[in-house]
Amino acid sequence: MADIKKALSMIGLCKKAGRLVSGVPIVVDAMRDGKVQLAVYASGSSENSVKRITDKAKTYKTATLALDVSPEELGHSIGKVGAVAAVGVTDSGFADAIRKIIDG
């Protein structure tokens, strides 16, 4: 659980640094443009949202990471009041840092 909190904190830092896009449609568009280094989605998201992110990630060869959090928790980590099903990290350094936190 501590790793997930660290990852959410790193995602919040990405947002502050301007290296993050949020929301399924925006993340998909950014993947299409080749801007997303890592797509992170909340495992508690709807089946449709998860499918959209994972299918587009395969199509555009983008790494994905499922966090065991609710969309509300993911949204809260980036300062949003509502639910956010997915975010896209646009910086390779932040993407690597998040993967290292989760992978150990």
Image (cartoon, rainbow, N blue to C red):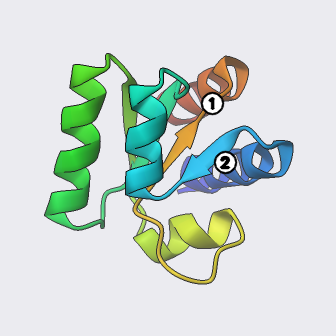
- Which residue is label 2 attached to? 11
Against 2, residue 20 (above or below) is: above
Residue at horizontal 47%, vertical 50%?
26
Q: In which quarter of the image is the C terminus?
A: top right
Say the numbered circle drawn on residue 90. 1
Q: Which residue lies furthest to the bottom in this view?
A: 81
Residue at horizontal 45%, vertical 44%?
27
Q: Which of marks 2 and 1 is in front?
A: 1
Residue 44 at x, y percent in the picture: 30, 67
Residue at horizontal 74%, vertical 43%?
14
- The answer to whether residue 104 is seen in the rendering is no
Task: Check disc 2 and give the amino acid type.
Answer: Ile
Q: Classify residue 9 as left or right of residue 104.
A: right
SS class, disc 1: loop
Residue 83 at x, y percent in the picture: 47, 76
Residue 37 at x, y percent in the picture: 53, 23
- Nearer-the-camera pick, 29 or 46: 29
SS class, disc 2: helix
